[in-house]
Image: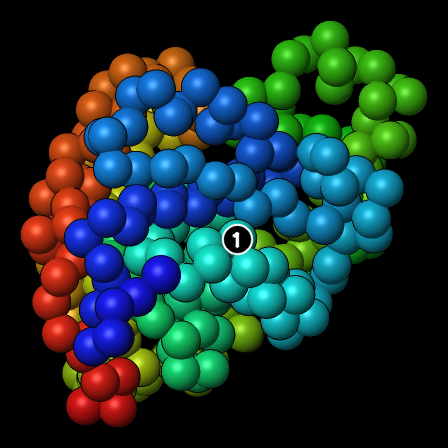
Amino acid sequence: MTSSNGLPRMSDPLILVCLAHAGGSVALYRDWQPRLPWFVQARMLELPGHGVRRSVSPHTEWPALIAQLADELLALVGGAPFALFGHSMGSLVALELMHALRERGERAPVWFGASATISPARRKHETHWLNCSQSEMIACLRERGGTPAELLDDAEFVDFMLPMLRADFHLCGMHPAHIARRTMLPGTSNTSAMLDCPIDVFIGRDDPATANRVDVDAWANETRGPCAVHWFDGGHFFIDTAREAVLAAVAKALLLHGQPAQRAQPVRDVAA
């Protein structure tokens, strides 16, 4: 809800919308609510084909996915101020949602938490995931961790998960092509294509996917706002193994950027 001058009302909660990783479910965030600041409500945005939406076909094209999720996000927050948090692929989805909302003239999030992924502008372009071998997919999952070995050895489980995993990995691999609108030549900048909200980046120290700190630090090029990087013990799924430390950092960021006093500021003209 907003007041007559277009600002969030001081009584409005801040909605923290959470998105999960490739092949994953927003059940990842099932115990976050009690550890968040008093004014924050955690809500989940499940991707088609995942979790409780497993019966729906997953998307393999970015425009269709983001068009659907943008509508669902707006319905989920209901006009209240909101923040976004995404783990791994969820970070890429959240970033695209922010750009889609801006293109629609909608309110921007007050904060974005990007977890377990390098800057999307530094990702490799990969086109093979829809047709890769089952063994290659399993090897990738073993390297990342987070999936019990006994499940990866279960042929029935792998067959069940493979279509969703292929779709998700394909989207992640094709993301650089989708963000071509924000790609600039070295030494140039396109500030009109940058976000305005603060970004906090969450990284596992032992995650090979984010080992290059230059690639991680490049998240700062996605926003005109502040960008901070936080490192935690653990691999790609440090969000589980270092959960208390992660939630403490999330809570601190939301207290800094999302409290009602911080939100009661004039809405910035996105065309400025």
Front-lying residue, 7 or 46: 7
Q: Looking at the picture, how far across and down is residue 40, in whole percent?
A: 30, 38
State left or right for residue 215 relative to residue 78. Answer: left
Q: How many marks on residues?
A: 1
State left or right for residue 92 relative to residue 185. Answer: right
Q: Which residue is drawn at 30% across and 21% down?
A: 35
Q: Can residue 13 be seen in this view?
A: yes
Q: Residue at x 74, y 19 (%)?
A: 152
Quarter of the image with the C terminus is bottom left
State left or right for residue 211 relative to residue 171. Answer: left
Q: Looking at the picture, how far across and down is residue 3, in whole percent?
A: 25, 68
Q: Picture quarter containing residue 237?
A: top left
Front-lying residue, 40 or 11: 11
Q: Which residue lies furthest to the front in this view?
A: 4
Q: Residue furthest bottom?
A: 271
Circle 1 crowding by C-alpha within 10 Å: few under 14, some 14–19, many from 20: some
Quarter of the image with the N terminus is bottom left
Relative to 217, residue 229 above or below: above
Describe the element under mark 1 as helix, strand or loop: helix
Dot 1 amino acid type: Leu
Relative to 97, residue 103 above or below: below
Q: Looking at the picture, how far across and down is residue 225, in whole percent?
A: 14, 64
Q: Residue at x 62, y 44 (%)?
A: 46
Identify residue for label 1: 76
State left or right for residue 257 relative to residue 270. Answer: left
Q: Which residue lies furthest to the top in this view?
A: 150
Colour option used = rainbow
Relative to 190, residue 129 above or below: above
Q: Residue at x 24, y 30 (%)?
A: 38
Relative to 271, residue 20 above or below: above
Q: Can residue 210 be seen in this view?
A: no
